[in-house]
Image (cartoon, helix red, strand yellow):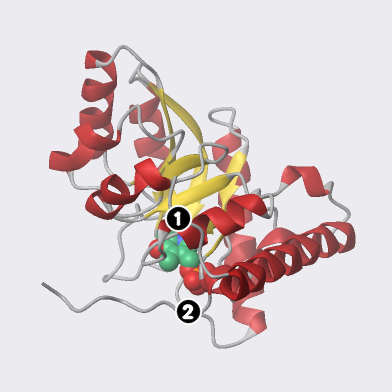
Amino acid sequence: MAAECPISIRQEIVGRCNEALQNIRQACIHADRDPAEVTLMAVTKTVPPEQVNAAVAAGIRVLGENRVQEYLSKKEDYDPDAEVQFIGHLQTNKVKQIVGNVTLIHSVDSLHLAQEISKQARIKQLVQPILLEVNIAGEASKSGVSPNALPDLLRDVLQLQELKICGLMVIPPPFTDPCTADRIFGEVNALYRKMQAIAPMDTLSMGMSGDYTAAIRHGSTMVRLGSALFGKRVYPPKP
Ligand SMILES: *Cc1c(COP(=O)(O)O)cnc(C)c1O
């Protein structure tokens, strides 16, 4: 495991984690939901492992990774009490390094990618749990399958024996007002229910630092928080 980080930073992260857990409980109570239905994921991009481990010490048990290389360089230093999931855009040539090493891949958005994951899972003789990523607002700059194409993708991916489809993931456009957040999360919720009629699923990965309480109101079962736990991200200069 990694070296401890300075006590002040550690305390700050633990404090933010406790606050987020408290906010999640409150949002669940307001929405008449059981707080046990909602998992808090700590999103670790750019965060040093010793700071990630402070979040694990605060009780967070799921870590979210965006980049394959960054994950591989940090994973040995993570507290083994937490499981790791993959939330970033996944290139087919890197699938091999991820399959079997993470408990859930959130970002499957094409049959081609699903087939590659299935192929690698077969080689490793395992079943890989996945989510289908939906591009709810049809943003050209973002990955994710369009809501219209989702049912066909779901039916196709269901044929792949080595994949277990657990649910949906969404990264909505940045919201400028709470009404838009409610409308979009409501649309995702309706889509999720429709897909549950095609295949059993229990995971809706929705909500980030700026909007997670709204996401919980609309049925999210996993919120992915980065800056709310670790502070503003500082990206290293591009190599
Ligand atoms: C970075 C990231 C997050 C967390 O974003 P914050 O706004 O810092 O909470 C969540 N999900 C995905 C897919 C991300 O890339």
Q: Which residue is pictured at 27% across the width and 55% down the height?
A: 70
Instruction: Name the residue beneath numbered marker 1.
Output: 3
Q: From the viewer's perspective, tell me whether residue 62 is left or right of residue 182.
A: left
Q: Residue 174: which numbered mark, if any?
A: 2
Determine the residue located farthest toward the bottom in the rendered image. Answer: 176
Q: Position of residue 129 (x, y in %)?
A: 45, 29
Per the model, the C-alpha gap separating discs 1 and 2 is 35 Å
Comes first in the chain, label 1 or label 2: 1
Can residue 166 be seen?
Answer: yes
The relative height of residue 160 versus residue 227 in the rendered view (above or below) is above
Q: Are marks 1 and 2 in contact (CB under 8 Å)?
A: no
Q: Amino acid at mark 2?
A: Pro
Q: Nearer the viewer, residue 104 or 43?
A: 43
Q: Residue 169: which numbered mark, if any?
A: none
Determine the residue located farthest toward the top in the rendered image. Answer: 125
Q: Position of residue 35 (x, y in %)?
A: 81, 49
Corner quadrant of residue 200: top right
Question: Counting other residues with Cα less than 10 Å from the Cα at mark 2, is it few (<14), some (14-19), or many (20 or more)?
Answer: few
The relative height of residue 141 versus residue 196 in the rendered view (above or below) is below
| The C terminus sits in image quarter | bottom left
The relative height of residue 175 versus residue 154 in the rendered view (above or below) is below
Q: Position of residue 102 (x, y in %)?
A: 40, 35
Question: Counting other residues with Cα less than 10 Å from the Cα at mark 1, is it few (<14), some (14-19), or many (20 or more)?
Answer: few
Corner quadrant of residue 11: bottom right
Q: Nearer the viewer, residue 165 or 148?
A: 165
Q: Which residue is pictured at 58% across the width and 33% down the height?
A: 201
